[in-house]
Image (cartoon, helix red, strand yellow):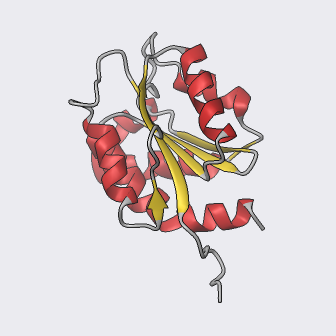
């Protein structure tokens, strides 16, 4: 019997680190996302973890590929700030069928009260849906990834997937 907000199958998740400087050897943020996903019934398949340059077209192609492959969720890290090369949000927003405004709002509130204070206004963390896939964009720091995963994504991922598939 399914509990409301839970699903009775593995959740297929993709992880994308967006950076001009990270490699799989030094990508602490992406590895941190994967560690947190291990606490759920989440599956990260071969090829569902990648590093993409800070380039809107490359980000768009990676997201579209993952969504088309049938993933339930995609979690990105990096490129959410206000620097010239930070284009993750500009790449994602046009792809969203629905933006989940509360994710960014609560992420910034938690960042403000628990972590970085007023610097949290610089975070442009967002979430949205594309078809039956939920997409989360987290900042690239391990602190931000831990906050987003522990306080928002891990507790609610099953519910997101349930809602998108009912």
In the displayed image of the protein, which residue is found farthest to the front? 46
Q: Residue at x 65, y 31 (%)?
A: 64
- Image quadrant of residue 130? top right
Q: Residue at x 72, y 37 (%)?
A: 96
Q: Is residue 151 above or below residue 99?
A: below
Q: Is residue 17 above or below residue 156?
A: above
Q: Residue at x 35, y 57 (%)?
A: 36
Drawn side of residue 160 relative to residue 141, left or right: right
| Percent coordinates x, y for residue 28 in the rendering | 25, 38
**Total number of numbered labels?**
0
| Percent coordinates x, y for residue 29 in the rendering | 31, 39
Q: Residue at x 29, y 17 (%)?
A: 21
Which is more toward the observer, 17 or 81?
17
| Percent coordinates x, y for residue 104 in the rendering | 54, 44
Drawn side of residue 104 relative to residue 39, left or right: right
Q: Image quadrant for the C terminus?
A: bottom right
- Image quadrant of residue 116? top left
């Amino acid at each position: 019997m399914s509990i409301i907000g839970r699903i009775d199958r593995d959740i297929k998740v993709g992880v994308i680190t967006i950076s001009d400087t990270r490699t799989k050897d030094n990508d602490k943020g992406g590895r941190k996302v994967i560690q947190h996903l291990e606490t759920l019934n989440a599956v990260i398949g071969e090829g569902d973890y990648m590093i993409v340059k800070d380039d809107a077209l490359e980000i768009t192609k990676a997201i579209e590929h993952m969504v088309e492959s049938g993933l339930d969720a995609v979690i990105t890290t990096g490129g959410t700030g206000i620097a010239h090369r930070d284009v993750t949000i500009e790449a994602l927003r046009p792809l969203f069928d629905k933006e989940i405004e509360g994710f960014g709002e609560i992420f910034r509130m938690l960042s403000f009260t628990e972590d970085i204070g007023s610097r949290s206004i610089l975070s442009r963390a967002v979430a949205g849906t594309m078809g039956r896939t939920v997409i989360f964009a987290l900042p690239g720091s391990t602190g931000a990834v831990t906050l987003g995963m522990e306080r928002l994504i891990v507790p609610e991922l099953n519910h997101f997937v349930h809602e998108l598939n009912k």
